[in-house]
Amino acid sequence: MNDLYSRHRQVLPDWLALYYDEPIEITHGEGRHVWDSAGHKYLDFFGGILTTMTAHALPEVTKAVGEQAGRIIHSSTLYLNRPMVELAERIAQLSGIPDARVFFTTSGTEANDTALLLATAHRRSNTVLAMRNSYHGRSFSTVGITGNRSWSPTSLSPLQTLYVHGGVRGRGPFAGLDDRAFIDACVADLRDILGHTRPPAALIAEPIQGVGGFTSPPDGLYAAFREVLDEHGILWIADEVQTGWGRTGEHFWGWQAHAQSGPPDIVTFAKGIGNGTSIGGVIARAEIMNCLDANSISTFGGTQITMAAGLANLTYLIEHDLQGNARRVGGLLIERLRAVTAQLPGVREVRGRGLMIGIELVKPGTDEADPQAAAAILEAAREGGLLIGKGGGHDTSALRIAPPLSLTVAEAEEGAAILEQALRSAY
């Protein structure tokens, strides 16, 4: 493994992040478990950054991929593509967006990039509203709207970005307010910003902020925002790259917790739909999707092999009610973790929905983020046989827990027990 790490360092960028003091090579997986090159078995509570949505080596997906690979792997969007049309039909029907059109990409970054292109072209404006503590990708345009300094390597941008309050409930100037007053204050902030700028193209927002540490506003915030946005013709883009496909348990899409004023104008998706294959995409009303006045293609977006994987994965998800499983098992897991951490002085909050759970860490006796503890707990969990993630903004440090949605109750209990020991080793 040390040899592979050396080779990695020689040919890949220094800024390409790796977990663990001694990085591991994951060689294979099955169900909710993976194995490294040394033969160690791990319970996977991070799923390749929320990407292995159903299970590792899911037979239905591997069979579909193998059969499709035996016919044709790729032809591009210049030709009719049956698996792409079939998956687009299913996603359009599930989206909640009227007269929906679907465009496939290869990643969430590219999906958000496309959504920004559509919104700015449709509105003839390069001003974008984004949320503080947000993350939307690593391309030039998506870095430019990301509101998280740790993931923003440049201040240069093709867009003018204005940041709005509301993505983080428990910190910031409005944290002490009750939910109704919090929403009112954030809406007032939005109205104030709009009074100082030319009309923006869109607001882009993650219903639950992923890289930011699984933070979220009270239900209804984006519905209240939508009322203000509609007064100005501003579009609402819901970044569902991490929250989509039932991960939150209560809803199929994260935006549905904010649905009182209708669906978003644009939804972006990726990660879980491909179960590890490279699928991203954009859903938008036809008038928005069709606003571009030049030709375009997607060489690898919608390629047959990934569409076959997506179709099989989505079918399995729905037929086995994995959204319901995320609600049930996720509810048990979050309550178990709250009980485990209740007496630990370094745990500020356990938050989340379904199988998207964050544990915010602070230095004991303070309200100051503790990234060193997060790193130590990550290491201790790995040593105990559990893989988790981490995240947070400029003043937060959080552990991120997002297993495949087929997680069993026994596996949830096993993971919670390992995590309890890891937490106790730090506090």
Image (cartoon, rainbow, N blue to C red):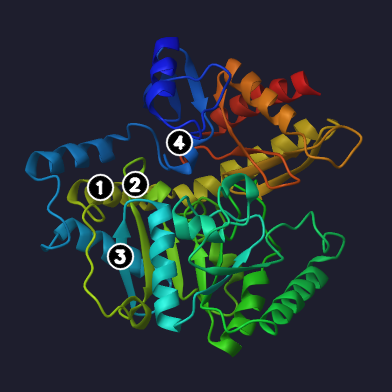
* Residue at the image point whose x is 60% and y is 70% from the top: 258
Position of 181 relative to 57 (above/below): below
Q: Residues within 10 Å of mark 1 (few under 14, many from 20)?
A: many
The outermost residue toward the right is 365
Residue 56 is situated, as x and y percent measured from the top left of the image, at 38, 32
Q: CA distance from mark 2 to mark 1?
A: 7 Å
* Residue at the image point whose x is 51% and y is 28% from the top: 18
Which disc number belongs to residue 306? Answer: 1
Q: Residues within 10 Å of mark 4 (few under 14, many from 20)?
A: some
User: If you read the primary sequence from the N terminus, does the residue marked by circle 1 or circle 4 appear first?
Assistant: 4
Visible residue check, residue 220: no
Say which amino acid is labelled 3: Phe
Q: Is residue 29 left or right of residue 148?
A: left
Say which amino acid is labelled 1: Thr
Q: CA distance from mark 3 to mark 4?
A: 24 Å
Say which amino acid is labelled 4: Gly
* Residue at the image point whose x is 35% and y is 83% from the top: 287
User: If you read the primary sequence from the N terminus, does the residue marked by circle 2 or circle 1 appear first?
Assistant: 2
Residue beneath label 3, please? 103
Residue beneath label 2, please? 274
Residue 110 is situated, as x and y percent measured from the top left of the image, at 38, 56
Say which amino acid is labelled 2: Gly
Cβ–Cβ under 8 Å for marks 2 and 1: yes
| Label 4: which secondary element | helix
